[in-house]
Image: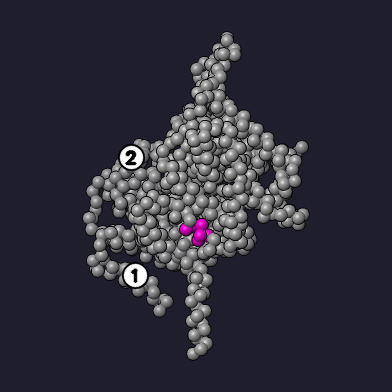
Amino acid sequence: MAQLELFLQTIISGFLLGGLYGLIALGMALIMGVMRVINLAHGDFMMIAMYISYWLFTLLGIDPYLSVFIAAPALFLFGLVIQKYLMTPVMKVESILPHNQVIMTVGLAMVFSNLATVMFTGNYRSTPVSYASSAWYLTDYWKGSPIELSLSMPWTLSFIMAVLITIALWIFLMKTDMGKSIRATAQDLDAALLMGVNVDWVRMVTFGIGLVLVAAAGCVFLPIYYLYPALGKQFTNVGFVITVIGGMGSTHGAVIGGLILGLFESMTATYIGMGWAPAGRFGIFVAALVFLPGGIASILRKRRLEE
Amino acid sequence: MKKFLPLIIFALLLGLPLIGLSTYIMHIVILVLIWSVIGMGWNILGGYTGQVSFGHAAFFGMGAYTSGILYQSMGISAWWGLPVCVVVLLALSLVIGFICLRLRGAYFALSTLALGEICRVAAENLVHFTQGNMGIMIRERTWVDKIWYFYIILFIAVGSYILIKKVMESKLGYYFVAIREDQDAAESLGIDTTFYKTISLCLSGILTGIAGAFYMNYMGYIDPSIAFPLYDISIVTVMTVMVGGAATYWGPIIGAVIMVFLAEEIRSLPYIGAAHQTIFGIILILIIMYLPNGIVGDFRKLMKPFLKKRGVQHESH
C-alpha cells in the first residue's frame, strides 16, 4: 500500500510541476513560433521576475501571487525594448555563422545571471509566505480512505494560476486581432506581410508576451521554490526541452510537453535519485529528438488530418 | 611574405622561452595556445561546416576526464590521456553525431547544448569513476618549469593548424563549405551530408578533446564545473571564434589571444572582476551586432577608414 501511495503522490506532484513547466515553455514556444529563435535567456528573464517578486514581498509585503500583476507588465516593456533594439537589428546583420539571434540571447543570459550574482549575491532566498506548509489531506475528507495523499496548498495555487494564465493566453490568441496577427506570422511570414501585418510590431509584442508568461511562471514558482542567480539556466533547459518535446513553436505541444516532463522528472527523482533528475530531463529530450523530431505537435497534426 | 608568415610566427614562438619570460606570461601564452586549439576545433564544425555547437565543453571535458581517470583509476601517467582520448573522443563524436547530426540548424545547436549538460550531470553523479564534485587531482607534476608544457601545446597547436589547412584545401574542405552554404544543394550534388558532417564533428571533437587532455596535465585538477561549464567553455569557445573570425585560419588564434588577455585583465580588476561574465556577455552582443564575421573576417571593414586615407595618398603621388 505504501508503494501505491508513493506512486500516486509522485504522479500528483509531477502533474502540478508539469503545469508550471508548461507555463514556462509556452512563452518560449510562442517566441520560437513567431521568430524561429530559441530564447536561451528565457530562464534568466524568469529569474529577473522572481527577484522583482521577491523584493516586492520582502520590502512591501506583497504576496508573490499578486506581484504577477507588477512583474509581468515590467517584463513586457523590457521585452519590447530588447526585441526592438537588440533582436531586430541583429536579424539584418549578414554573417557567416547562422543563429546570430540565439547567440545573442546567450549573451543576454550571461549578463543577467552574472549581474544578479553581483547585485544580490549568490545566496539562496525564499519568500516565507504564511501558507507555505499548509496542505489538504485526503483522510480529512474521506475518513475511511485506505491510502493517505496530500495536496500542498501553494503548489495547488500555483498550478491553478498557471492554468488560468494559459486559458487567458488561449483567448488572447484566438479572439483578438493581435492574437490572430501573431498566429498568422507564425504560420507564414510572407503571407502575413502581404496581408498587411506589421511584422516588426508583432515580433515585439510576441517577445513581450513570451516574457509576460515566463514572468508569471516566476512569480508563481517563488512561493514553492527558492531563488538564486544561477537558477535561470536550469529553467531555460526545462523550457527548451519542453519546446522540443512539444514540437517547435507549438503552444498545445508546450502544455502537453510540460505535463510529460513534469511527470517524468517527478518519477526520476522518486525512483532513481534526485541528482539524476536533470539527466532524465535530457534523456527524454534526446529520445524526443531521435524518435519524434516533430514533437507532440506532429502527432496532433496527424490526428487532425485523419479526422 | 604572406606565405612564410606562419613559419616566421612558428620560429618566433619556438624561441619564445629563450628570452626568459616570467612564469605568469608563460602561463598566459600556454592558455592562449590551449584556446587556439579549442577554437580551431570548433571552427571546423561551426565555421566551415556551419553547424553551430553550444556544447563543446562535452569534448573538452571528456578529454580532460580521460586523462584524469587514466591517472586516478589505472594509475598510469595522465599523459597517456593525449593518445587515448583520440579513441574516446572518436567514439563520443560518433555517438553525438548519430543523435545530433540528423537535426538541422537550431535543433542541432540545442541538442549539443543538452549533450554538454548531460556530460556535466553524468560527471557529477558517476562518483565511482569521476569522484563527483570532489574532482580529480594529479598529485605529482611532471615538470615544475613551464617550458616543456609550452612546447607540447605549441606542437599540438601547430599540428592542428596544419591539419585544418590540409583538410580545408582538400576535397573534404570543399564539401564542408558546400554543406554550410546550402545543405540541400550539397545533398542534390551527391554529397552525403550526414557522413561529411560526422567527419567534421569527429575532427572537431578530437582537437577539442586533445586540448582538454593537455589542460588536465597542465593544470592538474578538474571537477565537473571546470570541465563541463556551459558559459566558461562552450560559449567562450563560440566567442573566441566569433571575435577572431569564423571560417578563417587565423580567426581562432587571434580570438584566443584577445579572449585570454581580456579574461585575465578583467578578472584582475578590482570590483569588476566578479562581473567578468557580464562584460563577456556585453562583448558578445556587441560583436554580433557590429562585427559579425570577426576581426579577420571583417578586416576590410575595420580597416576602411585607414585604407581610404592611404588610397587618397596613392592618388596624390
Res B194 visible: no
What residue appears at the point 47 percent right and 37 percent down from the top-left corner? A227
Magenta stretch: includes residue B286: yes
Q: Using the image, determine if residue A234 lies above or below residue A16.
A: below
Per the rendered image, the range of residues in magenta is: B283-288
- In the displayed orientation, state which residue is furthest to the front: A60
What residue appears at the point 55 percent right and 17 percent down from the top-left corner? A137
Q: Using the image, determine if residue A293 lies above or below residue B186.
A: above
Q: Nearer the viewer, residue B40 or B74?
A: B40
Magenta stretch: includes residue A142: no
Cα gap from disc 2 to disc 1, whole angstroms: 39 Å
Q: Using the image, determine if residue A229 lies above or below residue B167.
A: above
- Write down the residue under mark 2: B134
**Residues flagged by tags 2 and 1 on a common chain:** yes
Amino acid at dot 1? Phe
What residue appears at the point 61 percent right and 32 percent down from the top-left corner? A161
Q: Which mark is residue B270?
A: none
Q: Position of residue B251 (x, y in %)?
A: 45, 65
Residue B72: name its quadrant: top left
- Write down the residue under mark 1: B10
Residue B130: name its quadrant: top left
Q: Chain of mark 2?
A: B
For label 2, the crowd category at 10 Å Cα-Cα, with few meaning under 14, some 14 to 19 and many 20 or more, is few
